Each structure stands twice: as structure tokens, then as C-alpha cells.
Image: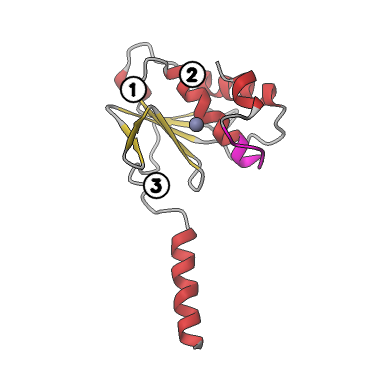
């Protein structure tokens, strides 16, 4: 019985621990915004004249200010990818992983900035433990 408990405890721990590979996206980043700690990967390599990590960090702070959030750290990792992003088999423009504090944004999105801000709001709701539903006023009032 004790052995079974240990095995189940181990399985539970493995299931709850953040995945080593960050859901297949990894943890590498190209740029860091020193002020917020926000990291991004892939934006500049796909789009000429891409916004910098500092600009993304400024958007992040503006969202936090709009939502009245106290916590902004730890800041997220934003990964820009070519092609589609899948969530439970369905195609989406953006995806946020609560366990690894990572947002994945498709470069196919025609509203990349809005998509990024949407995923940043998920992150702020997550680390501040506030209502994360899409009906939350944070989305309607602050994400443009
Ligand atoms: Zn969402």
C-alpha cells in the first residue's frame, strides 16, 4: 500500500510539473526586455521592422496598468511561430500555457498585436489569480 502511494505521488508530481520541453516550444528566447523581464522569440526573424522586446514590454505594462494588476512578474515568454497554432486540435492564433507562463502567437494572425495583448492578459490574470474568462472586463476594457 505504501509503495502504491509512492508511485501515485510520483505520477501526480510528474503530471503537475511544468513540462521540460514547454509543450514542445522550448524555453529559448531572442530578446529580453530588462524592465519587465518579458522575453520573446521569433518576432524579428519573421517580420521586417518588427517591434522590439521593449515595445512588447511597454504594451505589457500598459495592460497591467489598465487592469489594475499589482503583479507583473514573473513576466511571460512570448514565442512567435510561423503557421498554425493548435489548441486541442483546433486552429487558433494564440495560446497561453498557464503552467510554463508562455504565450505562443501565430504569425498568420492578421491582428498580431491584439493577439499578443490577448495572451498577455491571460498571463496577467494568471499570475494575479483573477478571473481569466473571456467575459472578464480585463479583456473587454484593456485588450485592443
Ligand atoms: Zn483567450
Along the line of sight, which residue is nearer the eye, 29 or 115? 115
Indicate the quadrant where residue 87 lies.
top left
SS for callout 3: loop
**Residue 114: which numbered mark, if any?**
2
Image location of residue 120, percent across then percent down: 54, 29
Q: Are marks 3 and 1 in contact (CB under 8 Å)?
A: no
- Residue at 56% x, 36% y is 123
Which residue is tagged 3? Answer: 22
SS for callout 2: helix
Which residue is tagged 1? Answer: 107
Q: CA distance from mark 3 to mark 1?
A: 19 Å
Q: Main secondary structure of the magenta part?
A: loop
Indicate the quadrant where residue 43 lies.
top left
Residue bounds of the magenta highlight: 125-133
Indicate the quadrant where residue 127 lies.
top right
**Residue 1 visible at all:** yes
SS for callout 1: loop
Q: CA distance from mark 2 to mark 1?
A: 12 Å
- Residue at 40% x, 43% y is 27
Image location of residue 100, percent across then percent down: 48, 46
Amino acid at each position: 500500500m505504501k509503495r502504491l502511494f509512492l508511485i501515485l505521488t510520483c505520477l501526480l508530481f510528474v503530471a503537475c510539473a511544468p513540462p521540460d520541453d514547454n509543450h514542445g516550444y522550448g524555453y529559448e528566447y531572442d530578446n529580453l526586455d530588462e524592465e519587465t523581464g518579458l522575453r520573446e522569440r521569433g518576432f524579428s526573424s519573421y517580420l521586417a521592422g518588427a517591434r522590439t522586446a521593449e515595445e512588447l514590454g511597454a504594451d505589457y505594462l500598459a495592460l497591467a496598468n489598465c487592469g489594475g494588476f499589482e503583479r507583473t512578474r514573473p513576466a511571460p515568454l512570448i514565442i512567435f511561430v510561423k503557421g498554425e497554432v493548435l489548441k486541442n486540435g483546433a486552429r487558433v492564433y494564440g495560446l497561453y500555457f498557464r503552467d510554463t507562463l508562455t504565450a505562443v502567437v501565430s504569425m498568420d494572425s492578421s491582428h498580431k498585436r491584439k493577439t499578443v495583448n490577448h495572451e498577455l492578459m491571460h498571463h496577467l490574470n494568471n499570475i494575479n489569480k483573477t478571473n481569466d474568462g473571456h467575459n472578464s472586463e480585463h479583456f473587454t476594457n484593456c485588450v485592443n
